[in-house]
Image (cartoon, coloured by chain):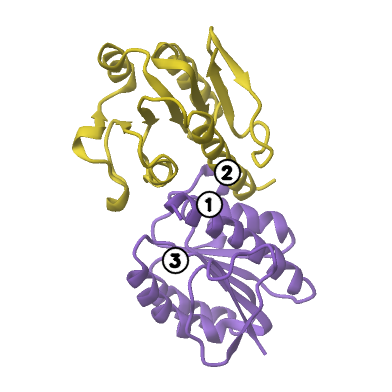
Chain colours: A purple, B yellow
Amino acid sequence: MSRLDLFVDRMVSQRACLNYGAALVSALEGPAFELGLGNGRTYSHMREIMPERDIYVFERSPAAHPDSTPPEDRLILGNVDETLPEALARFGDSIVLIHADLGGHNPEKNDAFARLVSPLVEPLLARRGLMISSDRMYFDDLREIDIPPDAVPGRCFIYQRA
Amino acid sequence: MSRLDLFVDRMVSQRACLNYGAALVSALEGPAFELGLGNGRTYSHMREIMPERDIYVFERSPAAHPDSTPPEDRLILGNVDETLPEALARFGDSIVLIHADLGGHNPEKNDAFARLVSPLVEPLLARRGLMISSDRMYFDDLREIDIPPDAVPGRCFIYQRA
C-alpha cells in the first residue's frame, strides 16, 4: 500500500463515518464539534450533511480555505487541553457529535494526542452522542460501534455514549 | 457536493488514472516525471506501481514526508518554466509518463498554470507516452484518451502521444 492508498482510505472512511454518524444523531438536539480545522474540507462536509446544526470548530491557528472558515462565533481558538475543559463548562454534556482527524504523519504522536484528548472529549457527549475519529481513542464509558460498510476498518472509529 | 467530496473524487481518480497509465506504458522504456512533490503521497504511489522505472520529481521547494522524498539525483529543483526546457535538452522525447496535480484551490490559477506547462511538457513525451493530470491541459499533438471506469470524469485527464 502506498501512502496515497492509505490517504484515500482515510478520506473515504472519514466521509463514510461522518455521513453515517450524522444520520444516527439526526433526531438528537445539540451542537457538533470539529477538533482541528486544517484545510476546512471536513468542516465543509459537516456543514453540508448537518445544515441545521451548530458546528463549533476548535483550532490553534486557523488557515483554512476562505469558503470553509467558520463564522467567528463558531470558532474556538486555542489549545484543546484548555479549550475543551472550557467547552465543558459552557456546553455541559450536550454535544451530539464530535469529529477529530488528528491526522499527523507520526502514529506515535497521534496516539499520544488521542490519549490526551479522550478524557477531555468524553464528558462533553450527550446520551447517544458520537465521537468519530481517524485514530483509536481511549474512553472509559463510551462503546465502540460498527463503522459503516463503505468505511475501511482501522481507518475510522466511532464511539457512542450509552 | 462538499469540498471533501470533491477532494475524495480527485484523489480516487488520480490513483485510478496512474494505475491505468502505468499499465498502458509498462512495455515502454524511459523515465517518468512527477511535476510537484507536495506531501509526496503521489510520488510514493508512483514508485510502488512503477518500481523499475526512474522517476524524476520537479519541485521548487521540497517539503515532503521523509519516506517520500526522492534521492538527490532524482530531484530537479527550480521553477518548471526553467527546469522543463532544461529537461528537454537532457532527456529529449524519452519520457513515458508525466503526472501533474496542479491542485490549487483556485481554478483560474490552475488553468493558467496548465496553459503555461502544456507546451513545455508536450515535446518531452515518447511515442505512446502519457500525460496524466488533475486539470485539463492544452496540447497541440496529444490526444485525450478515455479515463478508466473507476475514475470520475472531470477529476482526471489522460493525454497520449500518437
Residue A46 in view of the camera: yes
Residue A72 pos. (x, y %): 53, 56
Q: Which mark is residue A102?
A: 3
* Left or right: B80 as drawn, with respect to B155: left
Residue labelled with disc 1: A40
Q: Earlier in the sequence, mark 3 or mark 2?
A: 2
Residue at figure coordinates x 62%, y 64% from the top left: A55
Do marks 1 and 2 share a subunit? yes
Amino acid identity at mark 3: Leu
Amino acid identity at mark 2: Asp
* Left or right: A49 as drawn, with respect to B136: right
Residue A50 pos. (x, y %): 71, 61
Report helix, strand or loop for mark 2. Answer: helix
Do marks 1 and 3 share a subunit? yes
Residue labelled with disc 2: A67
Quadrant of the frame with the N terminus of chain B: top right
Report helix, strand or loop for mark 1. Answer: loop
Residue density around tag 3, few if under 14, some if 14–19, many if 20 or more, within 10 Å: some
Residue at figure coordinates x 59%, y 88% from the top left: A142
Label 3 to label 2, Cα distance in Å? 22 Å
Residue at figure coordinates x 43%, y 24% from the top left: B96
Tell me if residue B128 comes above or below residue B100 in the rendering. above
The front one of A136 and B98 is B98
* Left or right: B91 as drawn, with respect to A146: left
The front one of A26 and A158 is A158
